[in-house]
């Protein structure tokens, strides 16, 4: 059995690793010390198509598989666990209930902007 990641997933992981090394890692300690939430990082993640990985394309998501999602989570977590946790909450806790239980109107109104990175989902 082949346990290697598919080439497409490895390329995605490499891209996120490079992004994180440039946009997250150099600033993570400062963000933590200053209790700063880096919205600019989430905007850029949206531009890269990563804010709606688990959302189907019909709602402006990427429709990615779980292995690719976890590969991205791993790279974000290596750079800054706070960013990774917030991205995960956005991607799962905020987005997936809308996908599973939202009306079509709610999905178009809320899920699509979440998937595009125009809004950041959270819980509290």
Image: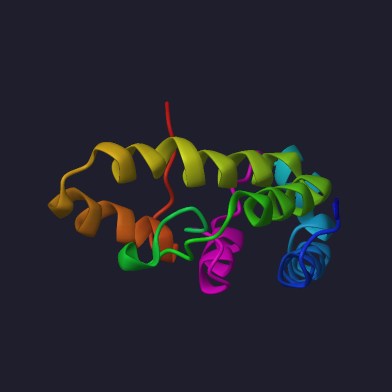
Q: Residue furthest top?
A: 124
* Point 42% across, 26% down: residue: 124
Q: Residue at x 33, y 61 (%)?
A: 113
**Measured from the top left, where is residue 43 in percent x and y?**
52, 65
Of residues 28 and 54, which is closer to you in this image? 54
Is 39 magenta? The answer is: yes
Q: At x 45% / y 35%, what residue is drawn?
A: 93
61, 113: nearer the viewer? 61
The colour scheme of the drawn protein is rainbow
Q: Position of residue 74 (x, y in %)?
A: 77, 48
Which range is magenta?
A: 35-51
Q: Nearer the viewer, residue 71 or 6?
A: 6
**Location of residue 40 by image quarter:** bottom right
Q: How many numbered circles does the render carry?
A: 0
Report the residue at 76% width, 65% height from top.
Answer: 6
Side of 25 relative to 113 (left or right): right
Judge left or right: residue 18 versus residue 54: right
Which residue is nearer to you in this view: 76 or 62?
Answer: 62
From the viewer's perspective, is 15 left or right of 62?
A: right
Question: Measured from the top left, where is residue 117 in percent x and y?
Answer: 45, 62
Image location (x, y in percent) of residue 107 = 24, 52
């Amino acid at each position: 059995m082949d346990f290697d990641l598919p080439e497409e997933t490895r390329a995605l992981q490499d891209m996120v690793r490079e992004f994180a090394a440039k946009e997250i890692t150099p600033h993570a300690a400062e963000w933590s010390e200053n209790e700063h939430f880096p919205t600019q990082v989430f905007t850029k993640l949206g531009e890269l198509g990563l804010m709606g990985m688990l959302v189907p394309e019909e709602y402006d998501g990427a429709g990615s598989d779980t292995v690719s999602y976890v590969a991205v989570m791993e790279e974000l977590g290596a750079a800054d666990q706070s960013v990774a946790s917030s991205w995960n909450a956005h991607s799962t806790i905020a987005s997936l209930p809308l996908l599973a239980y939202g009306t079509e109107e709610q999905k178009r109104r809320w899920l699509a902007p979440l998937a595009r990175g125009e809004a950041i989902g959270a819980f509290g």
